[in-house]
Image: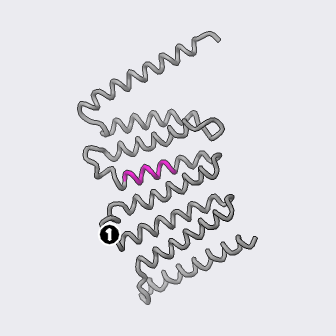
Amino acid sequence: MRSSWDFRLFVGVGLIVVGGLLMLQTMGILDVGGLLWAALFAAAGIAFLVALFQDRSRWWAVIPGLTLLGLAVAIASGDLFPRFAAVAGGAIFLGSLALAFCIIFLLRPDFWWAIIPAGTLATLAVVTGVADRLAGVDSGGILFLGLAATFLILYLLPEGRGRQRWAIFPAAILGLMGLGTGLLSGSAARLVWPAVLILLGLYFILRAGIGRRPA
């Protein structure tokens, strides 16, 4: 009971401090630097993570915890390494959100749904930080393939760990959309698409043969 009260007290004091600093900056009384904001957000994020370590049933605390830490890193890098922040700042923030949902799934394997926001946010982090800078790679293709991989992970989960058989259908559709939006082009695309059709045809033929096999 004491630790729960201490946690709420820390959050309350932190909110008052941040609100007061925002008010002073808005009124022009105090110019709060980016590094100070980064330190405050980092302290608040660590507080949420400490609350999680004290009681693993507070799985939700990892979301604000890592979100605030990711925001702190993005702000601090913007002040210290502006060129790096211009390239990777958004990816760092989105990656911290993705990591939060990954940890939720590790803490609560029955929360299979956490894989969907984790994969989506991780894909957006890659698109934001990398995809537009890779020659010959279309960011739309990366997005669809990342989402396809997310649903494929849901389909491949072991029985009893939240396996979702329906997930194979959005995985296949998104995967085809990823290939079709320009990830592969030219002669590679002319070879890939026939191979995909042949493999799909073989899959349906094999499934039909298995279905007719006598019990």
As drawn, the residue found furthest toward the top would be 214
Instruction: Give the magenta part as a residue range.
Output: 118-127
Work out whether residue 32 or residue 76 is closer to the camera in this orientation and state it: 76
Q: Residue at x 37, y 44 (%)?
A: 142
Q: Amino acid at mark 1?
A: Pro
Query: Which quadrant, please, contains the N terminus?
Result: bottom right
Residue 26 pos. (x, y %):
44, 83
For residue 138, side relative to residue 159 (left or right): left
For residue 84, side relative to residue 213 (left or right): left
For residue 115, side relative to residue 76 (left or right): right
Q: Which residue is mark 1?
A: 82
Q: In which quadrant of the rendered view does residue 12 lie?
A: bottom right
Q: Residue at x 53, y 13 (%)?
A: 209
For residue 70, side relative to residue 85 (left or right): right
Would you say the magenta stretch is mainly helix, strand or loop? Answer: helix
Residue 23 falls inside the magenta stretch? no
Q: Residues within 10 Å of mark 1 (few under 14, many from 20)?
A: some
Query: Which quadrant, please, contains the C terminus?
Result: top right
Looking at the rendered structure, the number of numbered marks drawn on it comes to 1
Q: In which quadrant of the rendered view does residue 60 lie?
A: bottom right
Residue 55 pos. (x, y %):
69, 62
Residue 136 pos. (x, y %):
26, 44
